[in-house]
Amino acid sequence: MEWREVTSDDALFKFINMGDFVEGKLKSTSISSLNTKIYHVERSDGSKVAFYGSAVINTKMSNVAVGDYFKLEYIGDKRSQEGKPYKNYKLYVPTDDAEDVV
């Protein structure tokens, strides 16, 4: 049997600064070698990016199906009920009356 490496041409997007966002069409998801969900997105300009999931991101993105348009924005750090810091996000989806999406 012959083997080939499976890679992604998608640029890795990192949410670093408050207001950073990814906007586009969810093309697919995959699982990393560390068992982390990866989201693959096509932007309106045709470029492709991928970003890693987290507990918060995965919960938000559970409302987005492959083929759906969305915008995920990093809105800053928050503290859990136990006092642990985590990154918080807002998820936006198109309104039903949207003519142009993304």
Image: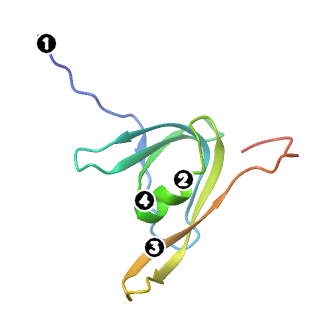
Secondary structure under the numbered disc 1 in the rendered image: loop
Residue position marked by numbered label 1 in the rendering: 2
The residues bearing labels 2 and 1 have C-alpha atoms spaced at a distance of: 36 Å
Residue position marked by numbered label 3 in the rendering: 87
Please state the horizontal and vertical placement of residue 32, each as a whole percent of the image.
Answer: 29, 44
The residues bearing labels 2 and 4 have C-alpha atoms spaced at a distance of: 16 Å
Q: Residue type at mark 3: give it.
A: Lys
- Quadrant of residue 10 within the rendered picture: top left
Mark 1 vs mark 3: which is more N-terminal?
A: 1
Rendered position, 80 above or below 97: below
Q: Residue type at mark 4: give it.
A: Lys
Which quadrant is the C terminus positioned in?
top right
Tell me, for residue 88, which label it has, or none: none
Mark 3 vs mark 2: which is more N-terminal?
A: 2
The residues bearing labels 4 and 1 have C-alpha atoms spaced at a distance of: 34 Å
Tell me, for residue 14, which label it has, or none: 4
Q: Is residue 6 left or right of residue 97?
A: left
Secondary structure under the numbered disc 2 in the rendered image: helix
Q: Residue type at mark 2: give it.
A: Met
Outermost residue toward the left in this view: 1
The residues bearing labels 3 and 2 have C-alpha atoms spaced at a distance of: 15 Å
Q: Residue type at mark 1: give it.
A: Glu
